[in-house]
Image (cartoon, grey):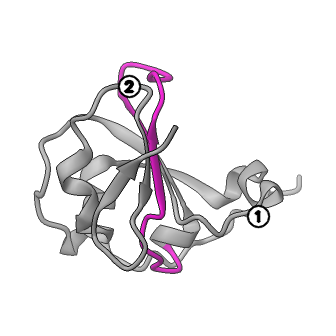
Amino acid sequence: MVKALIKKKNFKLKLEYTVRLVPSIGTCLATDKITVDGMPVGYMYRDYPLDEKDSGWRFIAGVEDEDYMNNPENLERFDVNVIANHDRSIVNYINLPYETKLQRVAGKDEFRQME
C-alpha cells in the first residue's frame, strides 16, 4: 500500500499567536503567498458561499499566476480572523456584501473597489 505524501506547510503566523480582530463570519480561501510566504493581501473578493461555513471571501497576494491558482495545494481554508491577523488592513472590509471585489491601493493599507 502506498501512502500519499502530504505537503507540510510552514505557516508564517502560528494559530496560537492570533487574536480576535473580526467577528466570526466563517471561513475563507487564501493563497500560500499570504499565509506561508507572508505577503500582504493584494486582492480580496467575496463570492457567494460554497457551504454554510464559507463567508465567501477569497484573499490573493496578486502575484499568483493561473497555474499557481489552479493547484489546490496552494490554497487553504481558514477562519477569516486568521487572515485578518496576517494582514490587518482587511478588517474594515470584511462585512461588505457578496460580489465585492477590492484591490489594494499601492503603498497603503487600504483597498478600492474594482469594476
Q: How many marks?
A: 2
Q: Which residues fall within the magenta stretch?
A: 36-58
Residue beneath disc 1: 5
Whether 38 is drawn above or below 79: the answer is below
Question: What residue appears at the point 46 percent right and 21 percent down from the top-left corner?
Answer: 48
Q: How far across and how far down the image is residue 27, in percent?
A: 36, 39
Label placed on residue 112: none
Q: How far across and how far down the image is residue 112, in percent?
A: 36, 52
- Magenta: main secondary structure: loop
Residue beneath disc 2: 98
Mark 2: amino acid: Tyr
Report the residue that reaches farthest toward the right: 1
Closer to the camera: disc 1 or disc 2? 2
Mark 1: amino acid: Leu
Q: Is residue 55 magenta?
A: yes
Give the SS element for disc 1.
Answer: loop
